[in-house]
Image (cartoon, rainbow, N blue to C red):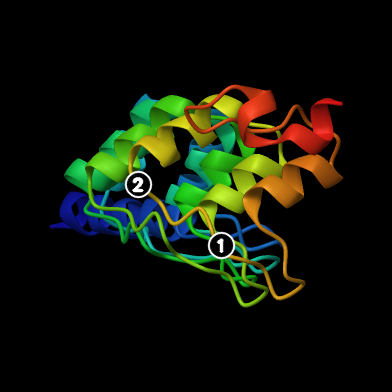
Amino acid sequence: MGVFILKEFAQNAFNLFLGVRTLDGYTGLHIAAVNGHLSIFKFLFEANVLDVEARIFNGGATPLILASTSGHLLIVRFLVEIAQANIEAKTNDQATALQWAAVKGHDGIVRFLVEHGANIETVTPLGYTTLILAAQAGQLSVVKFLVEQNVNLEMKTTSNETALDAAIRMKFQPVVWGHSTEEKFPSITQ
């Protein structure tokens, strides 16, 4: 009987330890997601004491958003396919995992999230779409992929800026949608 009680106490203490958050609100899942430690992530998930939708205090990111931002495709896959994390979860500024992956240029994650139903037309309160964010960040391969998915090219931010406008403002090579630069944007090539 005493061994059982001791074992039960040890398990409860272990579970309590796993549920501890940092001062910023990071759980073990958040830390493993940011650092790409899949084996630790799986262990923590399987311990079933941490919430895959838990948000950090500063910014509101979930483990999926952090893994997407950090470029850890295997953790993103695990979260979406196994843990069934909310693919449309948003940070406090209303950006999704797809939008963060697009900004950071993580092509594989962008493709994976889109293939698994992420909304490519999500708009932040300031009017930023995934396309505008990727163009503003100069992520040409992500922009090309999104264009291939038939995103709305004419969407504008609340400051009346399209994806092309954002790319030009940031002094990135203009994004070309299936045309030569001269043909599509004659004023910027002269």
**99 w.r.t. 178: above or below:** below
The location of residue 37, given as percent across then percent down, is: 46, 27
Q: Which residue is at a point 57% across and 70% down the rendered structure image?
A: 94
Q: Is residue 118 left or right of residue 178?
A: left
Count of marks, rendered view: 2
Task: Determine which residue is flagged by label 2.
Answer: 150
| Disc 2 crowd, CA 10 A, few/some/many (<14, 14-19, 20+) | few
Quarter in which the N terminus is drawn: bottom left
The location of residue 190, given as percent across then percent down, is: 87, 26
Q: CA distance from mark 2 to mark 1?
A: 20 Å
Local secondary structure at mark 1: loop
| Tag shown at residue 95 | 1
**74 w.r.t. 57: above or below:** above
Q: Answer yes or no: do the residues labelled 2 and 1 have beta carbons within 8 Å?
A: no
Q: Is residue 58 left or right of residue 145?
A: right
Q: Amino acid at mark 1?
A: Ala
Q: Is residue 9 left or right of residue 141?
A: left
Mark toward the start of the polypeptide (2 vs 1): 1
